[in-house]
Amino acid sequence: MAISKKYIIINESDIHPHINDGQPGDDNFLCRSIYGLLGLHCVEIGEALLDTLKPSLPRSFEEVTADEAYNGSRYFGDIRDSVSEWELAPDIDYTVAMDTSPLTSGPPEGSKVTKVFTEEVKGHIRSFMYKFAKEIIENEYSKKLRYVKNVSELEASTWEIQKHEAREWLTYAGASGSLTPFLDYVATEREFDKTVLANKILEKAEAYQDKLSTILVESQKLLKKFETATNVSELNILYEDYFGIMMPTDQAIALGRADDGINEDGTINPNKKGLRMAWFASGSDSRVASGSGETPTEWLPDVINPYLGNKLNF
């Protein structure tokens, strides 16, 4: 009977204690990371184990198909139409932990094969990159939300009660049937005028809702950019601009983001090709921004490019 497996994208801190690479050999309890980026992992996990862990996982995760997981993790960001890969002969089991036999002919027999990126495969890569980006964005904006709250979960759980009682008091001012036990307690304990306290609660609630709306709109706008990307090349640009993940060299050169390494005589300088570059004004350490009015004179390595370095730029 085949073991049922799932593939999920999840926060590293949530899944790390359970990663075991299938030891001691029962794939029902397999939990293996197959791709990691910016604190998130795509994990191959036994369905039985996932069902057991679900109640204890602190946040949601994104599920992907086996094809998305395989092609997405293996060819993440690849914009070529095909790749050449080494494939072992199908009748060779190359899983021995230690080979004690004398060294003879090197690696096991196999052959080079061409892997063609069909539209289906490209779709798997694009879908995987989008879903990974979705989790990165949601993960980061969840952190921003915690910063905006800046209170314990216990206190945050009382906000709806506070708002309800504050409106109740300001609307009915203690009329018959108007009950505000929480507001009464806080006003007494902190020696606040009840009306002043009610207004203060509603002011803070409105300020929080404004910040919450801003965060939600920002996250949705950013997510929409990744969602509407139609191919891997467009996703590579977004990954570089917002996540600091460098796109392939050939794409960067084509977009003018890297040195093409071409000398005046047409030869290629391999030491320059692919260097991330920017225009600098003569005698200046600062880059020349587009529309700055300065005349760019030197095309130099851009060591302070804000888009690079595996850091979020949003």
Image (cartoon, grey):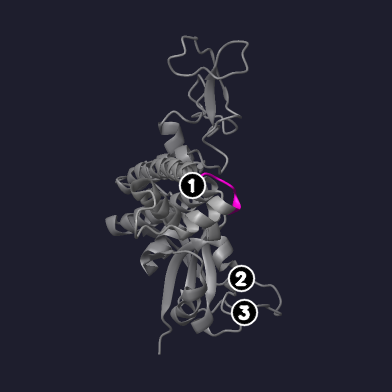
**Mark drawn on residue 291:** none
Q: Quadrant of the N terminus?
A: bottom left
Q: Are marks 2 and 3 in contact (CB under 8 Å)?
A: no
Could you tell whether 152 is left or right of 102 in the image? left
Q: Nearest to the eye among marks 2 and 3: give it.
A: 2
Residue 67 in the image: above or below residue 77: below
Q: Secondary structure at mark 2?
A: helix
**Mark drawn on residue 194:** 1
Q: Which of the two labelled residues, at mark 2 and mark 3, occupies the earlier sequence position? A: 2
Q: Residue at x 70, y 80 (%)?
A: 101
**What amino acid is labelled 3 in the image?**
Val
Measured as percent of width and height from the top left, residue 89 is found at 47, 74
**Mark drawn on residue 17:** 2
| Dot 3 alpha-carbon crowd within 10 angstroms: few under 14, some 14 to 19, many 20 or more | few
Q: Nearest to the eye among marks 2 and 1: give it.
A: 1
Could you tell whether 84 is left or right of 191 in the image? left
Judge by depth and name the residue closer to the eye, 207 or 134.
207
Query: Which residues are the magenta region?
Result: 189-194
Disc 3 target residue:
96
Report if residue 192 lies within the magenta region: yes
Q: Please, what is the dominant secondary structure of the magenta stretch?
A: loop
Judge by depth and name the residue closer to the eye, 159 or 180.
180
Report if residue 218 lies within the magenta region: no
Judge by depth and name the residue closer to the eye, 182 or 312.
182
Looking at the image, which residue sits at the far front?
176
**What amino acid is labelled 1 in the image?**
Lys
**What amino acid is labelled 2 in the image?**
Pro
